[in-house]
Amino acid sequence: MKAPVFRGPLLTAACAALACVSVVNAQPAATGPWAKAPALPTGCYLDGDPFSAQLEASLTAVQNDHSKQSDINTQIDQQVKDIGNTDPMELARRMQEAMMNDPQAARQYLENTQTLGQQVQTELPEASEKAQQVEAEEKALVARYQAALAKSHAPGDARWTALKKKMGIAPDSLGPGELGVPDWAWQEWGVILKERDAGDRATCAVWWATTGPMHAYMKHYKDYQIQERIPQHRKYIDEPRLKNYEMMSIPATGYKSTAEYEAVDKYLQLAGRLFGERVYRPRCTNDRCE
């Protein structure tokens, strides 16, 4: 998650009027690992928002559940490996027995295995390309947000450039200084910071609202995981594995796909990256600017 960057003190009354405090958005009821994902925030600022702590707790819980289920699945899979290591002929014997007990099901199993192998050659490269596309969309989204935020600071930046020139201070200065700064310069500096805060609020109203681009991308990413990545995992990993256990007469009690855990893990990490892009806090309060 992006490290907070100091931006200034507490919320302004104007920000409060724009509902810049964190408000959770309405979400449909979720089940399984998705139920552990916290509602996405709509607040403008990182400071004072409990979302980061909620996100960390959710990610830890999902990863713990994922680890536990992976251990169970590994124990089941180890039974097949143990048979192969101690008596390789036993696997062949079990397969032959399954074919004799139900020749039609065995033929179907072999045909499905062959078909799946053919599909892998075409579908997995496409899936890899789609994953890269989704990752590129995230980077482009963040770049657009950062550009919008920088654009919103343009009026304040222009005043700051003029002030630096008037005061004769270095172009890369971050502020007027600490000693010997005249009152008129401090007053102008306060106006500059307020204009930057106004830009932050205007950008926030567009980008971090429930109907904004960040929430839209989170929904897009969740849909992508649910509609594409999770079914692919089940198709190419879980279903063949379970069928193999059946053919080998290996009890698969307790086996469960880890696809959802992996999807929610990625979703939560994405939320951390995106919502960590928010401004840390306003530069000005009703009383002062810093």
Image (spheres, rainbow, N blue to C red):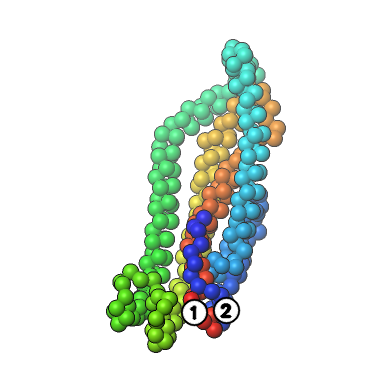
Q: Is residue 108 visible?
A: yes
Near-viewer residue (156 or 162): 162
Secondary structure under badge 1? loop
Q: Residue at x 54, y 43 (%)?
A: 231
Q: Is residue 191 above or below residue 283?
A: below
Q: Counting residues from the N terminus, which is met first, the one under dot 1 or under dot 2?
A: 2
Q: In the rendered structure, find residue 69 and report the number of the disc placed on it.
A: none
Near-viewer residue (18 or 229): 18
Secondary structure under badge 2? helix
Q: In the rendered structure, find residue 16 and report the number of the disc placed on it.
A: 2
Give the image location of residue 22, x and y in percent: 59, 69
Q: Amino acid at mark 1?
A: Cys
Q: Residue at x 40, y 50 (%)?
A: 133
Residue 250 position by quadrant: top right
Q: Is 151 on the left or on the right of 246, as rendered?
A: left
Q: Is residue 60 above or below residue 236?
A: below
Q: Residue at x 46, y 65 (%)?
A: 213
Task: Please identify the residue farthest to the bottom as the structure is shown.
Answer: 184
Give the image location of residue 118, x and y in percent: 43, 31
Q: Which residue is mark 1?
A: 289
Q: Is residue 114 above or below residue 9?
A: above
Give the image location of residue 156, x and y in percent: 38, 78
Q: Amino acid at mark 2?
A: Ala
Give the image location of residue 114, x and y in percent: 48, 27
Q: Is residue 152 visible?
A: no
Q: Residue at x 42, y 42 (%)?
A: 128
